[in-house]
Image: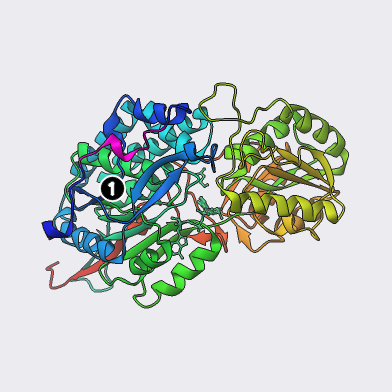
Amino acid sequence: MIKSSSIRLLSLKLANFPKSYSTYKALQVLQNLKNPELLKTGGFINGEWITSKNTFEVTDPALYPKPESKLADVSSFSVSDYNIAIEAASESFYEFRKTTGRYRAELLSNLYRLMKENQEDLAKIIVLENGKPYADAFGEITYAASFFQWFSEESARVNGDIIPSANATSKILALRQPIGPCGIITPWNFPSAMITRKLGAAVAAGCTTVIKPASETPLSALALAHLSEKAGFPKGVVNVLPSATSAEVGKILCEHPLIKKVSSTGSTGVGKLLMAQSSSTLKKLSFELGGNAPFIVFEDADLDKAVDGAIASKFRSSGQTCICANRLFIHDSLYDEFVKKFVDKLSKTTLGFGLDEKTTHGPVIHEKSMSKVRSHIENAVEKGAKLLLGGKRREDIGENFHELTVLGDVTPKMKIFHEETFGPVAPLTRFSSDEEALSLANDTEVGLAGYFYSSDISKIFKVAENLEVGMIGVNTGAISEAAMPFGGVKESGFGREGSKFGIEDYTIVKSVVLGGLEN
Ligand SMILES: NC(=O)c1ccc[n+]([C@@H]2O[C@H](COP(=O)([O-])OP(=O)(O)OC[C@H]3O[C@@H](n4cnc5c(N)ncnc54)[C@H](O)[C@@H]3O)[C@@H](O)[C@H]2O)c1
Ligand SMILES: O=CCCC(=O)O
């Protein structure tokens, strides 16, 4: 049990948000949410709101580094707070694992309904802490909530098996049981959906959770914690602890013996570190890591559809999506026309603040992302790539804004070919045969998503079978939904989220051999 002396109850005070916001409407938006209870700046441990004396700033990337960019001071929880939360999740697990799938389905569907009821507010929080346009943020909440709906439907169907035994007087029962308390680590690019995809599956299976949201976007995670409380989740099932000390608290999630599984979404580098740290307890792991998605336009493609698909895939969230097209391969015979149509459509987009109706694309998250975007463009141009659109920072809008950029004649000699940009840059490469396209596409250590456009059914099967990725969009640039098994191969990680496979990672199979049965 958590000792009350170790925690301080947080009554939500809007005073935790800066008062000097008259210069900018972002804070007014935050303070005028229809449901102000969604705004939390503490942490949620064992069903109680607590604060820490250490805090960190959450800022609006569209305004950063202006003083008005400050959205909130959020409590930063330490390893000792994590230890308390882990113990709470472990204690709660002993009861929660005994609950029925039907009961957990009810909790999840309550949470789904509450997300939909609060969709506008939740979307606004995403816009402010992440920078994506409101329409995208609203879409993220639809997507995020759909995982609770999906897993509420799956929850009552976590079936085991009865297996015939070689011994006539025995039966083998394979029971599916929840694995235990789970550590969940999530990134900033989908502040809500990357949590719900894991939390929905964990709860459906009967697991409890300790969640470390990205320090850039903790407000969305805390709003979800609030809604889980309203949805009737028992104490200790959902614990959310923002932290500015990711490495330390990540390590404790990996090394603590009471945590039985860690699911993390983030970069490949951090995934490797977490895997090494988890070896001491041989924890079950699921990793959704970085990508470098190929997007191939074969000569028999429908060009207009391919252009639309490329824009949707490459520039979703200004290129900050793990499954964004990262390298575009265009058949020689279509290359010039593709460039013309692609550049023409992209010229009609508008960079800006996410709550402005005209905005189609927002900023990148921070300076580190901006540096990578700049270095990929500069390195490519230096090595002979042609700048076909954009190419410049837009400091006139804000420090984190960068033009949507198209680079032509990109080759494997350039950095952008091998590294995930995670920003608004589309590198185009020509190819002349199917074999060449496949070999270029597979020339990378990661394998998350891939896309291609073709009207030849034989080619569709051949390419789909030979692309070294976990997910493929054929004649579409939008593949994500709760029903699709989400995950990668190679250094993009392992495990599948969403879909009927999503729960499996949160369960163990226990074999019970029932002997001495009479025939
Ligand atoms: N495969 C997917 O589903 C998926 C989805 C979204 C993002 N991503 C990947 O995530 C990356 C961008 O996100 P990011 O910059 O937030 O990634 P990141 O790996 O830096 O951070 C992800 C999470 O890990 C935490 N973290 C950072 N260092 C840590 C450490 N040493 N120990 C424990 N936790 C640590 C962060 O605070 C954050 O919560 C990209 O590579 C992108 O492709 C993958
Ligand atoms: O960025 C990674 C997740 C994107 C998605 O689920 O579509």
Residue 259 picture quarter: bottom left
Pick out the residue farthest to the top.
Answer: 357
**Left-right relation of 302 to 124:** right
Mark 1, Cα crowd under 10 Å, few <14 / some 14-19 / many 20+, is many
Quarter of the image with the N terminus is bottom left
**Three-letter amino acid code of the residue under disc 1:** Gly
**Percent of width and height locating residue 389:** 79, 37
Quarter of the image with the C terminus is bottom left
Pick out the residue farthest to the bottom.
Answer: 280
**Left-right relation of 296 to 71:** right
Q: Is residue 16 magenta?
A: yes
Of the pair 394 and 488, the residue shown nearer to us: 394
Q: Is residue 435 visible?
A: no
Q: Is mark 1 within 8 Å of ligand 1?
A: no
Residue at 53 percent of width and 41 percent of height: 61
Residue at 42 percent of width and 73 percent of height: 277
Helix, strand or loop for disc 1: loop
Residue at 64 percent of width and 54 percent of height: 420
**Percent of width and height locating residue 467:** 66, 54
Residue at 84 percent of width and 39 percent of height: 335
The tally of labels here is 1
Question: In the picture shown, does residue 308 fall above or below 330?
Answer: above
**Percent of width and height locating residue 165:** 26, 69
Q: Is residue 275 visible?
A: yes
**Percent of width and height locating residue 196:** 37, 44
Range shown magenta: 11-20
Residue 476 picture quarter: top right
| Magenta segment, prevailing SS (helix, strand or loop) | loop
**Left-right relation of 424 to 502:** right
Q: Is residue 508 magenta?
A: no
Report the residue marked by disc 1. Answer: 42
